[in-house]
Image (cartoon, rainbow, N blue to C red):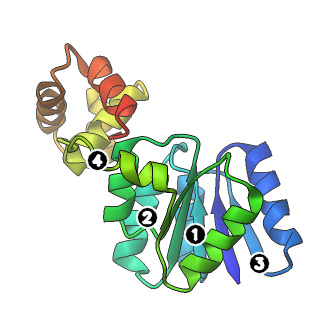
Amino acid sequence: MKILLAEDQAMVRGALSALLSLSGEFDVVQAADGDAALKLLQQQEFDLLLSDIEMPGLSGLELATWCQNHKPELKIVIVTTFGRAGYIKRAIESGVGGFLLKDAPSDTLIEAINQVMAGKRIIDPELAMMAIGEQDPLNDKERRALRMAAEGKSTVEIATTLFIADGTVRNYLSEAMSKLHATNRIDAARIAKQKGWL
C-alpha cells in the first residue's frame, strides 16, 4: 500500500514513516508541507494520504478538500495534536476517513489505516463528541484571507496570491471580523484558530 505522509515536523514525520515502514505493509513517501504534498498528489498515485492539519502552505484539511474534488478514490487519515471541534467537522465534510490524535498508540494508527482502507470511518470517540458543537461561520474565501493575514501578509499580498482585488480582500477580512466579533484581523485569526476554524 502506497502512503503519502504530509507532516511539517521532521522528527514526527520521520517517526511516523519509520513506524509504518516497519510493519512491512506500507510504502511511505514523505512531504514536508501541504504544498509539497499537493505536488506529489498531482504527480503520483497513492492509496492513502496521512496528513497533519496545521502545516505551512496548504493545511491538511485543504489537501483533503482538493483530494475530494480531484482524487475521490484516495483514502485520507488525519493525525493531529489538536482535537478542536471545528477541525473535526471540516474533516468529516472533506471526506476524511480517519481522524486521530498524535498521542494515540502506534497500533491504533495502523489499525485505523486498515479500517479506512476497508471503507470504514474511524474517529476517536472523544473527538466525535467534540464535533457536536458550534457552527463555523466562515466561508472558504474568508478563511483563506484570514489565514494569510495571520501569517503577516498584507492586503496587497493576499490579493495577489488569491488573484482578487485589494477591496475584495478587505471585504473578506471585514466579514470575518464581524462574524467572529473581533476587534481586528489578528484577533479574528486568533479566535478562528482557537476554535479550529482556520
Badge count = 4
| Image quarter (top left, top right, bottom left or bottom right) of the C terminus | top left
**Relative height, residue 162 to residue 189 (above, below):** below
**Mark nearer the N terminus (2 vs 1):** 1
Distance (Cα) linking label 2 and label 4: 19 Å
Q: Quadrant of residue 46?
A: bottom right
Mark 3 lies on a secondary structure that is: loop
Residue underneath mark 3:
26
Screen quadrant of the N terminus:
bottom right
Q: Which residue is disc 4 drawn over?
A: 162
Assess disc 3: are there few (<14), some (14-19) or many (≥20) residues with their C-alpha within 10 Å of its C-alpha: some
Amino acid carrying label 4: it is Leu
Disc number for residue 49:
1
Q: Say which of marks 2 and 4 sits in front.
A: 2
Q: Earlier in the sequence, mark 4 or mark 1?
A: 1
Residue bearing the label numbered 2: 64
Amino acid at circle 3: Phe
Q: Residue at x 18, y 32 (%)?
A: 176
Disc 2 versus disc 3: distance between alpha carbons? 20 Å
Q: CA distance from mark 3 to mark 4?
A: 37 Å
Dot 1 surroundings within 10 Å: few (below 14), some, or many (20 or more)? many
Which residue is drawn at the image coordinates 16% and 40% (left, top)?
165
Report x, y in % for residue 105.
73, 54
Q: Position of residue 7 (x, y in %)?
A: 64, 51
